[in-house]
Amino acid sequence: FLPDIRRILKHVPQKRQSMVFSATMPGEIRHLVENILTDHVTIQVDHEKPAQTISHVLFRVAQNRKTALLKNILKEKDMATTLVFTRTKYKAKNLARQLQNAGYRATSLQGNMSQAQRKTAMNGFRAGKFNILVATDIAARGIDVSGISHVVNYDIPDTVEAYTHRTGRTGRAEQSGEALTFVTADDGRLLQAVERRLNKKIRRESIVDFDSGFDQASSRSGNYRKSSSAKGPRRHKASTRGRKGSARRKTASSRYE
């Protein structure tokens, strides 16, 4: 919608009062504010806390295994209506297409779509034609769909406010909801910020054959270990026993690798 706003601004008087309201303030919105407002004043309300009706779950995974992990979870869990968040428009479109090709009723909502395409996607999601909507933060603004059972942070958001805003799409009207977050070896700082806001550790779950990719990426980059406790994390080895090819889920240690 940023190009639309810029076109509108060309036709309004230069001498005017302008006000910008936003649930979150990502970089694109801050840049817009700095360009269209003069001597602006920022008023920020108290940070909203996540609803107590939402259970938060974290999965460790290598970046290139996220889509496979999502498909595995969709197959295992009863996810009636799911909202999946990605960081980029390309990723939202591509992920929705991959889910469609795998037989899921998925669609995307991202900035490169026309208004008519967005309307078709949203109407289909509300009506149940699609039960998975893959979206970016900006494209998903204003979405008000009741009964969303799960929110998946395919990419952990850049700010704590965005995390609260995303996960707040589920667990509404006293109904329970679940927020699943995929975390790579490079996401340590963002995860720590989210857990400070929640004032608790997010429950760790793992699926055999997915943690191993995370461990390899972590040892290569070294980035995540900097965010671990000074005493050093406890190592958690996933069991590979069981039938060949099976993927078993279990709750991992509360310490993060």
Image: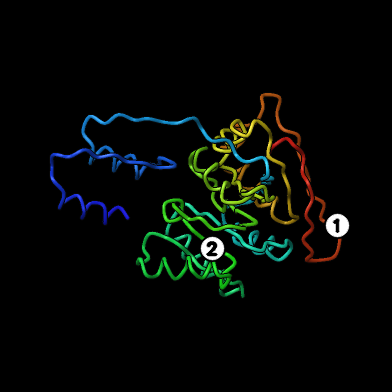
Camera-nearest residue between 61 and 217? 61
239 over 107 or under it: above or below: above
Q: Which of pointers 1 and 2 indicates the residue nearer the eye?
A: 2
Q: Nearer the viewer, residue 254 or 162?
A: 162
Q: Amino acid at mark 1?
A: Arg
Name the spot of residue 169 as percent of width and height, x first: 56, 51
Residue beneath the point at 69% across and 60% down: 73
Asked which secondary structure carries label 1, the reply is: loop
Horizontally, residue 10 falls left or right of residue 187, namely left
- N-term-proximal mark, 1 vs 2: 2
| Percent x, y of residue 42 | 34, 30
Q: Position of residue 197 (x, y in %)?
A: 59, 32
Along the line of sight, which residue is nearer the eye, 200 or 90? 200
Q: Where is mark 1, residue-wise?
A: 241
Q: Quick check: 101 above or below 150?
A: below
Query: On the image, numbered disc 2 is attached to which residue?
Result: 133
What residue is at 52 percent from the left and 64 percent from the top?
A: 95
What is the quadrant of the N terminus in the image?
bottom left
Image check: 157 left or right of 16? right
Q: Quadrant of the C terminus?
A: top right
Image coordinates of residue 127 in percent, x first then y, are: 55, 70
* Dot 2 amino acid type: Leu
The single residue placed furthest to the right in the displayed view is: 242
Residue in the image at 24% along x and 40% along y: 18
Say few, some or many: other residues with alpha carbon within 10 Å of mark 2 (under 14 / 14 to 19 / 20 or more): many
